[in-house]
Amino acid sequence: MRGDLDLVWLGALLLVALAVYWRLDPTLPRPATITILSAQFLPLILAAAGQTVVMLTGGIDLSLGAVLSLGMAVFVTNPAGNVVASMALALAVTVLAGAANGALVAYAGLPPIIVTLAASFLWAGVTLIVLPQPGGQVPAELVRAYNMGWYGLALPAIAIGLALAVWKLVKTTRFGLALYAVGGNEHGAFANGIDTRRVKIAAYGFAGLFTGLAGIGLAIQTGSGDPTIGTPYTLNSIAVAVLGGISFFGGVGRMRGTLLGALLFGLLSNLLLFTGISTFYQLILQGVVLVVAVAVKTLAARERVA
Amino acid sequence: MMAALTALRGNRPLWAFGVLVVTWLAAILFAGGFDSVASVRYLVQTASFLGIVAVGQTLVVMMSGIDLSVSAVVGLSAVVCAQVAAGSGGTVAVLVALAVSALVGLVNAAGLIWLRLPPMVMTLATGTVISGALLIYTGGSPRSARIPLLDALANGSVAGIPLATILWLAITAVAVWLLHLSRLGRYAFALGTSEPASRASGVPVPVTTLAMYAACALLAGVAGLVLLGFTGTSSLTMGNPYQLLSIASVVLGGTSILGGRGHVLGTVAGALLLTLLTALLVAWNLGEGPRQVALGLLIIALLLVYARERRTT
């Protein structure tokens, strides 16, 4: 119940942001604007979805930005010769990278912070080998269809919907249940016969899938690849997930919260652009949103206990 | 005798020195150019930049914290110093840079104490805010500066030992006193072992947190100044390598990432080890990508070998 109330507040904030946005940009409800906005928000939404899966197990992924760049780099170098096969290959690589992170966390007895921090070096290095400089190419028709609409359909919005629908299905499976169980009480989950290690590896693998999709989306949106473009997504995905009500300690929170959080975060960033002040302020906004979101959550929780 | 051996096996900081010696010997045997006095001098000089940051990181890790804003503070201190020096001269610039750095540490601690934020979140956020603030402050193009004092500190030497290294060792000595001999250090260890228990037994949590995070940020600031002296230029990203490497130095130095266990001297070995490994990878002429891959793999491997924690959750 309490979580739902949080989501209502978040939804209300989002409506306010939308209303302000609409005033500044009257084209907001038009399909073209929706297509552009969804293309712009897709990487953040999916990256935050990936971070959410990991955080639900009580972990954290500081290598997310590097894995995002990796997926983008593999995709734009077009190793398979055609777009669909390259996409599949990029996703396979990011899922493997995520699962490798998960295996280290599950088997090494090392805290996720330090494992994924070290892994971020590794994946950033692999990305630089795949794509040493910004470059690569995405077929122009695809870029146009994705950003301008395809027979009036907002492809990025559909992609987001599909990814979240997949997640909704996964959540109803045994794995989905086990994910929350491991995050809520790892010992209890283990005692109840859940293979906690496998659950963790699968969770980080899933994060890799979402992150890879985010990287591919970013590549199609911008039309090329950049080996270091993913870096800010590490922090932003955490900020968005926390904003959406995902607990740092695992087991608490919902994907729809993350979605609302990402939309709010994206709209706020755009609103900042409308005010005409330098994009440099974006970084400050991100840091402040993170601190405020977590502080409000923690202080509210303390009040309830007291 | 057996008891002594068991104690030795459990002494992770000592292990760190062992791994360092073995790696160094291997470097001398299998890669050319690591046996000359000049190369040793260069290594301890470059290790001191990382080492100073890592000593600070040790202070907060020991109390079960972590500081992910060190990379930003290294840049902050160098950029602010270069910027202020252009107008008001070197000495003022150095003082301003150090004051700003320490202030960041106090802000970090304040977030932990009064907002109850997890250290990772708070320091990640301050790091991001600093990066943004630096972009605005410099308009995206930081200055270069030659400050004689810093130049001498970074490049000078006394009796063949680089001044930067002497500074690092002096800082380490103070840190050993602060963490292992002073009352504040005992509080930090207590907090790292169990926060509820130390709160209950009257450990002054706010004072300890403020002191340790301020010291950590101050040391990151010092490292930034020495780096400024070394390179003569400041850049917004000059601190980036020190984020992961300082934490890795602490953990490879035998300090538990969960806090409460370890020694500052282990961190010295950790910083030397990582600098040596980086130098080895450079000596093999690897490109930027393969070098990062190799370093990442090496760090993960070393962590697996001797930094594993007993599962506590």
Image (tube, coloured by chain):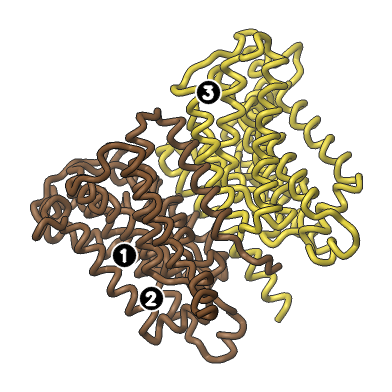
Please name the residue shown 30% across and 69% down the image: B172
**Residue type marked 2:** Ala
Q: Is residue B263 left or right of residue A13?
A: left
Residue at the extreme bottom of the image, as rendered = B201
Which colour denotes chain B? Answer: brown
Please name the residue shown 79% across and 59% down the image: A3
Residue A154 occupies which quadrant of the picture? top right
Q: Check whether the beta carbons of the residues at disc 1 and disc 2 lie within 8 A of each other.
A: no
Do the residues at discs 3 and 2 belong to one chain? no
**Residue type marked 1:** Leu
Q: Give the SS element for disc 1.
A: helix
| Label 1: chain letter | B
Q: Position of residue B45 (x, y in %)?
A: 23, 52
Please name the residue shown 61% across and 64% down the image: B309
Q: Which residue is mark 3?
A: A130
* Relative depth, front residue between A277 and A217: A217
Number of the front mark, 3 or 2: 3
Q: Which residue is mark 2?
A: B211
Q: Which residue is mark 1?
A: B218
Which colour denotes chain A? Answer: yellow
Earlier sequence position, callout 1 versus callout 2: 2
**Residue type marked 3:** Val
Residue at the extreme front of the image, as rendered = B1
Q: Give the SS element for disc 3.
A: helix
